[in-house]
Image: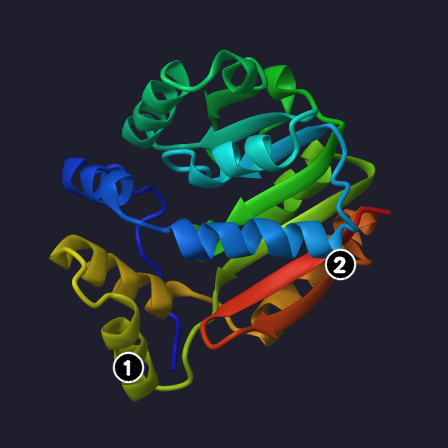
């Protein structure tokens, strides 16, 4: 099944409201625990969450590693407004270690975002990008030498029938806007082989990416992990 790109930013009012209200508790918790397992329980003290949306993973990272600071980056102003509203209501100890900034990939340079992050994390950003090399460039720019990288994203189904089966099984009871977006995201997702090829090309310019691994995960995801050289 051929890839059909979707809009890079999710910032429509109905989208933001639906995603802010949706219950991603189980999948978000599983992703953070998967990161913990792969990095040996220690992602370091400076984490960055690329494509953070309303901050679900950003907050989880901060709670999971109470000594770490976490920066959430996203290009969608309305999504970031929700994340910052949540931050304002968070316990002071947690709020002091979290931050949210607007950034659109590709990053011309890290600039005020700085670099030297000990872990670079992303959940479901890759399939939104029209040029996926922008993500791998950002990983190379933001991560310190030896930084742990964990990227989880949807994996494009092999057929329209398989895609529709996932929409039915994964969005039961969800608002129509989430069902529509999930279908579009599955169409826009990459295969494992395509991501392997992206990394091979990006490693020619950013050698630190050469050690990253790619594999399918469960029935609908792929994951990229490893340490920057």
User: Would you identify the image quadrant in which residue 45 lies?
Assistant: top right
Question: Horizontal and vertical percent for residue 226?
Answer: 76, 55
Q: Secondary structure at mark 1?
A: helix
34 left or right, relative to 157? right
Residue 149's place in the image compared with 114, above or below, is below
Residue 133 visible in rendering: no
Q: Nearer the viewer, residue 26 or 78?
A: 26
* Quadrant of image for the N terminus: bottom left
Q: Nearer the viewer, residue 177 or 169?
A: 169
74 left or right, relative to 162? right
User: Which label was assigned to residue 212?
Assistant: 2
| Residue ID at (16%, 54%) | 177
| Residue ID at (60%, 63%) | 223
Q: Label 1, label 2: how many angstroms apart (C-alpha)?
A: 31 Å
Which residue, given by chain and number where applicable, does mark 1 sit on? 165
Q: Badge 1: how crowded within 10 Å, few (<14), some, or many (20+)? A: few
User: Would you identify the image quadrant in which residue 44 lies?
Assistant: top right
Q: Secondary structure at mark 2?
A: loop
| Residue ID at (36%, 68%) | 186
Question: Horizontal and vertical percent for residue 123?
Answer: 50, 50
User: Which label was assigned to residue 110?
Assistant: none
Residue 104's place in the image compared with 211, above or below, is above
């Amino acid at each position: 099944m051929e890839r059909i790109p979707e809009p890079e930013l999710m910032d429509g009012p109905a989208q933001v409201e639906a995603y802010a209200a949706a219950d991603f508790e189980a999948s978000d918790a599983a992703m953070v625990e998967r990161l913990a397992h792969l990095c040996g329980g220690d992602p370091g003290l400076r984490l960055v969450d690329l494509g953070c949306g309303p901050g679900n993973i950003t907050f989880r990272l901060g709670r999971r590693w109470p000594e770490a600071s976490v920066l959430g980056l996203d290009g969608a102003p309305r999504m970031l407004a929700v994340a910052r509203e949540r931050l304002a209501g968070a316990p002071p100890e947690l709020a002091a270690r979290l931050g949210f900034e607007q950034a659109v990939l590709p990053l011309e340079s890290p600039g005020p975002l700085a670099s030297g992050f000990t872990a670079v994390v992303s959940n479901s950003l890759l399939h939104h990008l029209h040029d996926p090399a922008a993500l791998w460039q950002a990983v190379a720019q933001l991560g310190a030498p030896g930084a742990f990288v964990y990227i989880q994203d949807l994996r494009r189904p092999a057929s329209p029938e398989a895609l529709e089966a996932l929409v039915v099984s994964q969005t039961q009871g969800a608002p129509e806007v989430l069902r529509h977006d999930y279908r579009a995201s599955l169409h826009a997702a990459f295969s494992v082989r395509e991501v392997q090829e992206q990394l091979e090309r990006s490693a020619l310019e950013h050698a630190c990416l050469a050690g990253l691994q790619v594999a399918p995960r469960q029935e609908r995801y792929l994951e990229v992990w490893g340490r920057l050289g």
